[in-house]
Image (spheres, coloured by chain):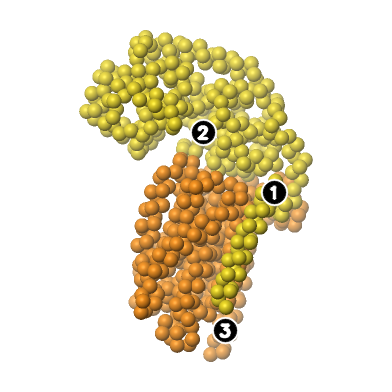
Chain colours: A yellow, B orange
Amino acid sequence: MMKRMLTTLVTLMIVGALAACGQSTTPNGASSSTNTPTNAASEAPESSSDVITHDANAKIASMSIHITNNLLALGIKPAGSVVGGDVKDFLPHVADQLEGVSKLGVVTDPDMESVLALKPDVIYIDEVYTGDDLAKFEKIAPTISIDMDNGTWRDHLNRIAQHVGKEKEAEAFIKDYEEKAERVKGLISAELGQDAKVMAIRMTAKELRVMGMKRPVGPIMFEDLALNPAVGVEKITDEPYAVISQEVLPDFDADAIFVIISKGNEAKANFDELEKNLVWKNLKAVKNKHVYVLDGQKWLDYSSIGHSMALDDAEQLFTK
Amino acid sequence: MASLEQKRTTRAILVGIILITVAAAVIVVSLNTGTIRLSPSSIWRTLLGGGSFDEQLILFEYRMPRIIITLLAGIGLGISGAVLQGVSRNSLADPGILGIHAGAALGLIMFVSFFRNMEGPTALLIPMFTFAGGAVISILIFMLAYDRFKGMIPIRLILVGIAVEAGVSALTLFLSLRLDEDTYSFAARWLAGSVWGREWVNVWALLPWIVLLVPIVYLRSRSLDLFALGDETAAGVGSHVTRNRVIMLALAVALSCASVSMAGGIGFIGLIAPHIARRLAGPQHRHFLPIAALIGLVILVTADTVGRSIFQPNAIPAGVVVAAIGGPYFLYLLLSTKPNSRRNS
């Protein structure tokens, strides 16, 4: 008797789960068909594949901090933006440019009600994070989905410029950037010499990382500034960075070391500790005083404005 | 005897009515809470099918699914805790303390490691994985707590549970450290008891478990009453003690695992809800089970509402809010429990 009941129960549950599965694979999902008296069809006439263009003064909700920063590079201040997941606020290096902008939650957990309350004219989302929720955003306003994993920041900037009709500004920004990169390159090689091999390390609260050839730091250092990677750095290509122990620092044989210290006291303390270490003190770069502490947020921000600010940071470090 | 019975029934019904009112009030307040303020009247209008498009969007798409999930999970955890306390004859039993949640967490971490994606239809599989994890760990705990001659030993159940939980949590932590950063932050939030299920699909994943299992528990509540008499007496009046115990435990595990799969690893509700319920409605399970469910509901919905509103813009996981109240309550129980009492009161 008991057995029969349990069998029935389990069967029912599996059937229930399967039925729900079937339901949710239909395009609109179980949600809208059952409980939402929806008139969404008229609200979202455009599909994301068409290039939506809109006025540069439109009310924009940006659901990616990188899209926000690319907008800023074009001289556009969005009406609302998500905040950085780490700092739970706008990224410090652009915070002053985002004064008065509504905060819309974190990219992985956007606050839909704030987005709705903002009543934006257009929404930008990062396909990588929020692509699956496209339909949800389209109920609020026409939504532009940009794949921020695809292409370089120049591509992102150009793509966004297309939507807001600011292609010229994007071009000018990139040209300006290339010129600045050229200038900084000169400054650096004047200081370190043509063949200097460099590496960038990042000290976090729990580990020491060597930044590799990939984003965010690789492209600007080893392509835009055309610096030579230190021994072994060129092998870090699968991940943005590799975690190392302090003992292997000499193996990289770097002529100069760029240091990024994560925010927080622990990371700072870790770096102070490292500076007292004999291994560190005996490094070629340290002996020659070629250690440069970077303004980390700018370098880690893979966006047009972040990179531009990173160059400014470098320019300042090497102009003395 | 009959009059006492009747008195208790009346009392339970009365308490039930009051709690339903409280629950309704809490739900309305919760529906009311969010970035956009909706007045109760506009909520009422929207619920009846009126309201602007925005109001409908807020209510039905953003707030309702989440509230239904907390409501269902609250019921599931309350009942599960009541069953576990009945089965183990120990008022300190709780799915979290027994290590069932740790097993569910392990199941979830395994799931994330395999599938990564938390969106869409795969969400429906999460309860299966947490249940599998919880079930495996429970079986382990039961086997360790089983004595060949005495059957399941209640106190050993708790102690073994605590020990196994520590081990399993370590394993979960180890696995979660190997996840990439985004998945890890999800897992961390889940472990802290953040109600992450906010879509209707999550509601459908949880609903069948609660709707089917809670009535079954209720229909079998008599066997819980018999456990309270002690194993020998229960066996003497014709109860298959060990078999009943296994069935009830399985039901409790299923309920709590399904609940935490959508609501995150929330402890203490399974501990507090049955306690308060027993004080309000007396020791008979058929009286206090529904009350425990309602109290679980009220606690979790309140905790989630408080967590997501008071500390704006940084929401606090509901589990943290519950733990902030539940922890001290647990200590209070621990200290005030006299040996050999508290079984029935």
Say what secondary structure mark 1 lies in: loop
Horizontal side, residue A214 vs residue A25: left or right: left
**Which chain is mark 3 on?**
B
On the image, the x and y values in percent for residue A120 come to 67, 35
Q: Which residue is mark 1?
A: A26
Q: CA distance from mark 1 to mark 3?
A: 52 Å
On the image, the x and y values in percent for residue B139 come to 43, 66
Q: Residue at x 66, y 57 (%)?
A: A19
Say what secondary structure mark 3 lies in: helix
Residues tagged by mark 2 and mark 1 found on one chain of the structure: yes
On the image, the x and y values in percent for residue B204 come to 63, 57
Q: CA distance from mark 2 to mark 1?
A: 37 Å
Residue B14 vs A134, above or below: the answer is: below
Q: Which residue is mark 2?
A: A90
Q: Residues within 10 Å of mark 3 (few under 14, many from 20)?
A: few
Q: CA distance from mark 3 to mark 2?
A: 61 Å
Please identify the quarter of the rendering in which residue B164 is found.
bottom left
Horizontal side, residue A77 vs residue B161: left or right: right
Q: Which residue is mark 3?
A: B7
**Which chain is mark 1 on?**
A
Q: Residue at x 32, y 21 (%)?
A: A254
Q: Residue at x 53, y 26 (%)?
A: A303
